[in-house]
Amino acid sequence: MKAPGFKVGHRSGGFTLIELVITISIIGILAAVALPRYISLQTQARTAKAQAIYGGVRSASALAHAMVIATNITTSGAATVAMEGTNVTLINGYPTADAAGIITALQIGAATDDLTISAGGAGAGTPITIDMNGASTPATCRVTYTSANSNASPVVAVDTAGC
């Protein structure tokens, strides 16, 4: 007696070797096309991140300077201003190029934002660099902030050549 629905000579369901080979080939072709685009997206993301930090540094610096002018704090020498309830150190009316200055005003952190932040300084004309981690050449995927000299604005630069 035969089981219901079972036909003699009928193969059980499954894939043939040729079907598996074709499927694997298609997946390989798709991977070959998608991988370069994925790598390009990482570069574009690091470039966008550097540009965003550049804009943030310029904005934070301008905001701190506006607060100095609005509150009649001295624009020569060292001072502090409260931003978002946190004191930001200043030199010549702009944030200093260190963790207590521009980094505090910008509200970024090396660990939380996947950055490498170099040691800057509180003195006028001192630079600090913010490197994007994961860049092919970190030294050319960075934002640099140089604190203000007297009667001058700080210098902010971005380099995205190696992102």
Image (cartoon, rainbow, N blue to C red):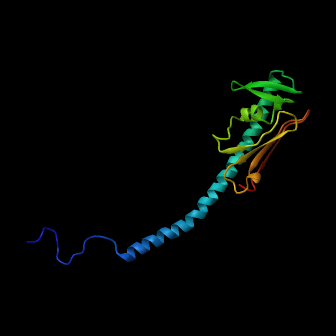
Q: Quadrant of the N terminus?
A: bottom left
Q: Is residue 94 above or below residue 142?
A: above
Q: Is residue 78 above or below residue 21?
A: above
The number of callouts visible is: 0
Q: Is residue 92 above or below residue 115?
A: above
| Residue furthest to the left | 1
Picture quadrant where residue 149 is located: top right
| Residue furthest to the right | 151
| Residue furthest to the front | 119
Residue at horizontal 78 percent and vertical 30 percent from the top: 64
Q: Is residue 73 above or below residue 60?
A: above
Q: Position of residue 33 (x, y in %)?
A: 56, 67
Residue at horizontal 75 percent and vertical 48 percent from the top: 142
Q: Position of residue 154 (x, y in %)?
A: 84, 38
Taking the image as shown, residue 6 lies to the left or right of residue 130, namely left
Picture quadrant where residue 136 is located: bottom right
Q: Is residue 137 or residue 155 the one in the foreground?
A: 137
Q: Position of residue 95 (x, y in %)?
A: 80, 32
Residue at horizontal 65 percent and vertical 52 percent from the top: 45
Q: Position of residue 35 (x, y in %)?
A: 57, 63
Picture quadrant where residue 126 is located: top right
Q: Quadrant of the C terminus?
A: bottom right
Residue at horizontal 65 percent and vertical 42 percent from the top: 113
